[in-house]
Structures are given as C-alpha cells and as structure tokens.
Image (cartoon, rainbow, N blue to C red):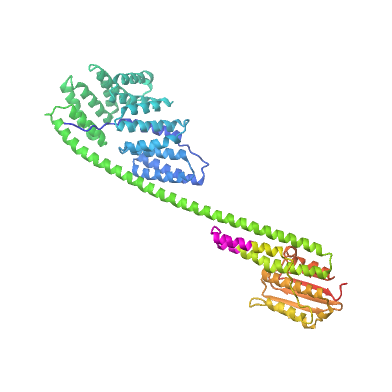
Amino acid sequence: MKLKRYFSSSNLLLYAILCIALCLSCSKKDNPNLEESNLLGRQYTAQADSLFDLGALEKAFELYLLSNQELREINDHEMITYNNLKIATIYLTIGDANSAQETIAKELYYIKEDDTSLQIYSNLVLSLSYTELLDFENAIEYAKKSLAISNDKEHQIITKNNIGYLLIENKQYKEAEEILSQVLQEYKDSINPTDLAKIYNNLGKAKYRINKASGRDELSYALKLREKENDKYELVSSYIALSEYYSDKDANNALNYAKMAYEHIEDISSKKEKLTILEILINNSAINHPIYKKSVTDYIALSNQFHVETQLSKNQFAKIRYDYDKHAKENSKLKYNLQVKNTTITKQHNTVLVLVCVLLLILLVVTIVYSKIKKKHIVEKGKQVYKTESRIAKKVHDELANDIFNTLIYTQNFNLQDPEKKEHLIKDLDAIYKKSRNIATQLNSIDTEVNFTQTLTNLFNEYTSEKTKIIITGIDNIDFSMLVKIQKITIYRILQELLVNMTKHSMATLVVFKFTKEANGISIYYKDNGIGLIYEDIKKKNGISNMESRIENIKGYIIFDRENEIGTKLSIYIPYRYV
C-alpha cells in the first residue's frame, strides 16, 4: 500500500515555539512613553499574543492584522514585523507552509542585523516551513543560521537536536551522529530529562541507520527516561523507534513495541502525528497482522478527515486575510483621495493668498501715493488741499476700496484654476491699477451755495434706512452763508465720514446730529447708539483719521468723548472766519 508521507514536524514545532517565546520576549520591548496612536496597535498585539498562547489562532490572526493596520499609520515597522512573524507561525501551525514562507520573506528587509531575537525567530520559522515542504536541505540551512547568531544555551541545545533530526530525515546519518554526540558532550549535565530523551532517541536512530547493530543502548535509555517522566506522547516516539530497530532483528519485539505504540495513539491529540504513527505501524507490520489492518482502516479515515479540516482552516484564514486586504485597499484609496483633495485646496488657498498679497500691495501703493499727495498739498491753500483730498477720498473710499473688496470676494467664490475666471481677475486688477493711477483726475462737486442746507439733508437721507434712523435738529437755524466754501466742504466731508463710519463699523440704529449756532461760529453734536469707537483706533482708520487735520486747517476743532461707554459721542466746532 502506497501512503502519502506525513512528515512529523510537531516535535520541531514544539521546540521552536519555546525558542520563539524566549526570543520574542526580548524583542517585544515595553515602552512606557508610547504615543497615543501607537498604543492601540500594541494593545491589539498584546490581546493577540494572549489568544495565540491559548490556541485561539483565528481570533489572534485577526487581531494581528488589526494591529498592523494601526501601526502602519505611524510606520512602526518593528512591531509590524513582530506581528507578521507571529502570523507566519499561525500559518505554519495550520499546515500552510507556503503562506508562512511568503509572510517571512516580506519581513526580512525590515529585520535589523542587530535584532538577534527576530533574526533567530525568522530563521526558525523558515526552517520549519521548509521542513513541512520536505525540503530538508533548506530546513537545515536556516536552522544553522538561527544557531549561528544565538547565545542562549537552551536555544542552542534545542536547535542542535532539531538539526540532528533534520539530518536523519535527509539521510545524512554521520553528520547527525556528530552533532548529537557533540550536544551530549557539551551540555549533558545541564539538559532536562525531556530534551535529553529526545537527543538520545535521535542519536540512537542515527547510529542504527549507519550500522544496524548500533543504537539500541541510546534508544533504550531514551525510553527509560520517558517512562520515568511518564510522557505518553514521547513514549509513542520511543516505541516506534524501537519497533523499527527490531524490525529486521527480532519480529516479536518489533511487534510488541508496535502494539504499545498503537495502544497509546489515542493519547495524542494531533491528527498529523497520529497519521505519522499509523504510517510507521503499517510499514513495520505484517500484512496479515490485525494491527496492520486496523492501522490501514484508521489511516484512511483519519487522512480524509485531516485533509478536510486542513483545507477548511486554510480557506478560513485566507478569507480573513482577503477581507483585511480588501479593507486596507479601500482605506488607502480613501486616504489618497483625501490627500488629493487637500492638495487641491492648498493650491487654491495659496493662489488666493498670492492674489490678496497683490491687492494689498496695490492698496499700499495707493496709500503711499495718497499720503505723499496729502503732505505736499497741506502747505498749499486750503481750497486746493480739499479739492485734492476730495478726489482721493472719493476714489479710494467709494470706488477703489469697493473694487478691491469685490475682487477679494471674486477670488473666494470662483475657481481661479479656470482660465476664464483667471482672465476676469486679471482684468479687474488692471482696472484697479488704472483707477489708482488716475486717482487725481476726477472731482466731486458739492453744492456749497444757497442750497447747502438741502445738500446736508440729502446726505443724511442717503444713510437713513429701516435699520438706521437719523435725527437732525437745529440745522434750519444755521446761517451757512457765514461760512466760506472751504468750510462748507469741510463740514460735508466730516459728516460724510462720520456716516460712513457709522454704517460700516458702529452698527448703530439711532443717530443724532444737533446743529447749534454759537457767537462766533457753529457747533455740531454727534451721538449714536452703536458699539462705540476707541480713539486710538479711529485715528488709524481711512477717512475718519483725517477729520482732525481737516478741522485744524479751518481753525476749528473736534472733541471725542473718550469716557462714553455706549455708542460714539463727539463735538465739532467751526468758526465763522478762519483767516
């Protein structure tokens, strides 16, 4: 009967897990100063480790993947490597050696040369993977790599025994005998009974394969140690080894040991190990013997069951991995789209910022020009000063400022990447430039003759609205004919600037202008119920800031009530004659 060979690597895997636990306890360092973003990933890893130790591999697998998802956000490659090595171990445990190899191969780049614990771990898992695939040459190579970088005595003992075991499977019996004998010579007094029995059992098999008359003493001593330890699993291993030894020497002894192995087979939980034992019993029993028939029947049933369970397990873990990878790709796509969107917004923001800077530069140039013109004309006649200021004030405050404001609104509401919108913006900026250049070419006319009272009334009416009520008292009692033209223009400009400021800044709902005839001039009292103005701030604002200089030019004065806490209150005095 031709049987599919089930290589028994659980012995190796059990040893390797012990080494892995030792290695990783050094590798996974606790860090009390973890960032909050790192903490969740490490919590997932800790939970996964606990489940792994309890044998809940499926849930542990999911948590390792979740941990990786969190750790990738902060590029914690060390912990990601740790998680993936544990994932590879899970693959190996369920019999998926190819996936284990693939997972390890991706992590080799990230394992630092000075991180011996992870180096040892990765080499152990690769050795076990090749063992499962019956590639003993590579299995031995990676086991030796693990041994070369290990300074731990316990790890060296276990690994050398595993290498001896692999050499036997690879029919390198002499090399196996040498390394196993070396282990006993170096460490015999410090090896625990369980490991010592394994070494003697392997050494006995190596000697028997070299010389069929040799090896019995070592096999018998291994059995004696195991009987003393009452290790039922390892007893089966000794029974099988002795049955094989006696198979061509003493048929009765061979059969007796085979019977004892079969009687203890139910003590073994691993189906794979049971298949290995049944295979050996079949190969070493006579065809007409009851043990042979029973072993064949059990082998066929167990083999089918093992294949189904193994495939189901592989499929389940493959689905978990597929779902995780799919979710990770979706997250990556969302993050990429968000990054593109943020980049676009940043570019638009930068474009708007540049345009705002250009507009502010233009405004600065206009302000400088305005300041120079004002200083130049302050020494000229008052009339020429106010003509120039009228043109500048009208242009800057009524036209230029509005154009700049509208242009700023345009940059915020439209996509400047659109060539048509960009061309429109360039035209607006050009128009602003031309207006600033021609700021002194246009004049405002103010009726300062017999209708000046009506001119002021019209001004007040312009700023009266449903939200703002303006009350004027005493204006009809004022004889404006006592004032010269420049004084009337000054009054008009000051009142206009007060109304503009009230509209833009104070948010007043009630405004009072009280005109009073004085002995040598007139006084104007202003009050509103707005939010109020700070004197120092007033002087800095365009339009309002030059009221004092206007009044001083006609020998008058303006007084701001700085004690007032509600609204704005001020008094203006203008003499009948100022020359």
Between 470 and 295, the residue placed more toward the observer is 470
Q: Position of residue 288 (x, y in %)?
A: 11, 29
Residue 412 within the magenta-colored segment of the rendering: yes
State the residue at coordinates (26%, 35%): 272
Rendered image quadrant of residue 535: bottom right
Q: Does residue 64 appear in this view? A: yes
Q: Position of residue 479 (x, y in %)?
A: 82, 81
Is residue 414 found left or right of 260 in the rendered image?
A: right
Q: Residue furthest right?
A: 579
Q: Position of residue 192 (x, y in %)?
A: 35, 25
Rendered image quadrant of residue 396: bottom right
Query: Chief secondary structure of the magenta span?
Result: helix
Residue 513 within the magenta-colored segment of the rendering: no
In what quadrant of the picture does the N terminus appear? Answer: top left
Q: Residue furthest left?
A: 288
In the image, residue 95 sits, relative to residue 496, either above or below, namely above
How many callouts does the rendering have?
Answer: 0
Q: Does residue 415 appear in this view? A: no
Rendered image quadrant of residue 500: bottom right
In the image, residue 218 sits, relative to residue 345, either above or below, namely above
Is residue 70 found left or right of 320 in the rendered image?
A: right
For the record, the magenta segment spans 409-429
In the image, residue 218 sits, relative to residue 510, either above or below, namely above
Is residue 497 found left or right of 130 in the rendered image?
A: right
Q: Residue furthest bottom?
A: 476
